[in-house]
Image (cartoon, rainbow, N blue to C red):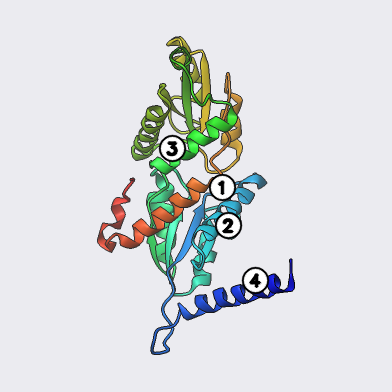
Amino acid sequence: MTDLDSTADIMAGISSRLAGQLSLVTLDGRRRPGPPALVLVGHGSRDPRALRTVLALMERVRELRPGLPVRLGHIELNEPLLPDTLAALGDAPAVLVPLLLSRGYHVKRDIPEMAAAATARTRVAAPLGPHPLLVETLYDRLLEAGWPTGPDDATRRSSGVVLAAAGSRDPDSAADTRRTARLLADRLGVPVVPAYASAATPTVRTAVRALTARGRHRVAIASCFTAPGRFATQCAEAAPWIASAPLGAHEAMARLVLHRYDQALSTPAAAEPTLASA
């Protein structure tokens, strides 16, 4: 690199930083209010890979929306815990985006109660699923695991997918997972059966047997988990053919997080409890 190129890069960097600072100031010299913080709400896991995955996703969100303050809080098992993250915000505004893939107790009770107990002015966004961006991630993870990119009719007739999710006793959670399964089936052109690691039926092994009984001898497991952990590992072990990796820090997941953030900001406060799913 020549001295001229080096000088140009330095000046470009200075100009970029100066423009960023000026964007925070109005014409009369007053500081513009910044956007509400985006607080990613992870479940928490004893598996160290889960925290690493969530941190990687957080970095992708920051890359897609420079200047947006992004924080992390967990419901349990990992630090920082959500109440501590909210306490650090003081009375600043924030949008809590659950890194959960359906409605259930955590989304309906735990997270809103933690938010209500904080001094921060918060909104709680909808969970990440169901949504086409979630299905885009599931599809890409299946391709990475070995799903054929252009299956012929014979391959489609012999193939099926089990959508493996955590499970919940809440019927809304099951409804959301079924909706995600239908969207993925439309994308793949094969049957997709939702199944659960706990608290709901069918189990993954039962769903695999059901598809096999229908003549679907190439059965894949689509891992509908945000990050690696005990449930994701158990479900993958039940795969008779291939099993996809958890959703992780896929770019579509980062875009989905930002979509939920924007959606929450554009939703009137009185309408927030409905937790729109699309």
Task: Please tell me the numbered disc located at residue 249.
Answer: 1
Q: Are marks 2 and 1 in contact (CB under 8 Å)?
A: yes
Amino acid carrying mark 3 in the image: Val
Task: Please tell me the numbered disc located at residue 272.
Answer: none
Q: Residue at x 39, y 65 (%)?
A: 122
Amino acid carrying mark 2 in the image: Glu
Task: Determine the image quadrant of residue 167.
Answer: top left
Sort mark 4 into few (<14), some (14-19) or many (20+) by Cα contacts within 10 Å.
few
Which residue is identified by label 2?
A: 59
Q: Residue at x 53, y 27 (%)?
A: 221
Who comes first in sequence, dot 3 or dot 4? 4
Q: What element does badge 2 sit on?
A: helix
Residue 132 or residue 102, whichever sits in front: 132
Sort mark 2 into few (<14), some (14-19) or many (20+) by Cα contacts within 10 Å.
some
**Can residue 77 be seen?**
no
Compared with residue 120, is residue 142 higher up or lower down, i.e. above or below? above
* Marks 4/2: CA–CA distance: 24 Å
Q: Residue at x 61, y 33 (%)?
A: 233
Q: Residue at x 50, y 25 (%)?
A: 204
Task: Determine the image quadrant of residue 273.
Answer: bottom left
Task: Please tell me the numbered disc located at residue 9.
Answer: 4
* Marks 3/2: CA–CA distance: 21 Å
Who comes first in sequence, dot 1 or dot 4? 4
Task: Please tell me the numbered disc located at residue 135.
Answer: 3
Q: Are marks 3 and 1 in contact (CB under 8 Å)?
A: no
